[in-house]
Amino acid sequence: NEIREVLPCPTLLAKVPGAKFWVRGLANIRGRLLSVSDLAHFILGQRSSFSSTQKVLCISHRDQYVGLVVDQVLGIQHFNKKSFFSQSLDLEENLKEYCQGYFHQHNQHWHVFLFSRLLQNPHYMNASTKFIN
């Protein structure tokens, strides 16, 4: 429910001076400014290398409108409620604060990433390298 649309990675991004390393830039999406960040770079500290499968997830939560670069999108997945488990035991430590359980389907764990938790993180929301008082 948190993802509004999925876009190909914009080829033209306006750089943001003084922004943290994981901020890719700003894109104009149908007349609306979209800040674009590298999700893996923010969470794991590893910059995603460009590939043709990369997409931008447009997240609209309350008054926030952000784009997150991910390596690929597999489309809409449907899960049986009976395959949901509330605790994620095999999840990397950096992801635990953003995930809430997982679905087990086709011998895979599909973790539930809550983008609203990312947008509540003050480290993500303050993308400036300099603090302004």
Image: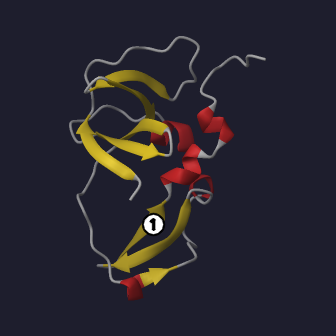
Of residues 21 and 107, the one nearer the viewer is 21
Quadrant in which residue 82 is drawn: bottom left
Whole-percent x, y for residue 100 in the image? 54, 67
Q: Residue furthest right?
A: 133
Residue at position x 67%, y 39% from top? 122
Please say if 10 is above or below 111: above
Please say if 119 is above or below 103: above
Please say if 110 is above or below 73: below
> In the image, 115: left or right of 57?
right
Q: Which residue is mark 1?
A: 111
> In the image, 1: left or right of 95?
left
Of residues 30 and 35, the one nearer the viewer is 30
Residue at position x 54%, y 62% from top? 99
Quadrant in which residue 48 is drawn: top left
Camera sees residue 70:
no
Q: How many marks overall?
A: 1
Residue at position x 34%, y 18% from top? 13
Instruction: Say which element carries label 1.
Output: strand
Whole-percent x, y for residue 90 in the image? 54, 69
Q: In the rendered structure, which amino acid carries the disc numbered 1?
A: His
Whole-percent x, y for residue 97 in the image? 62, 57
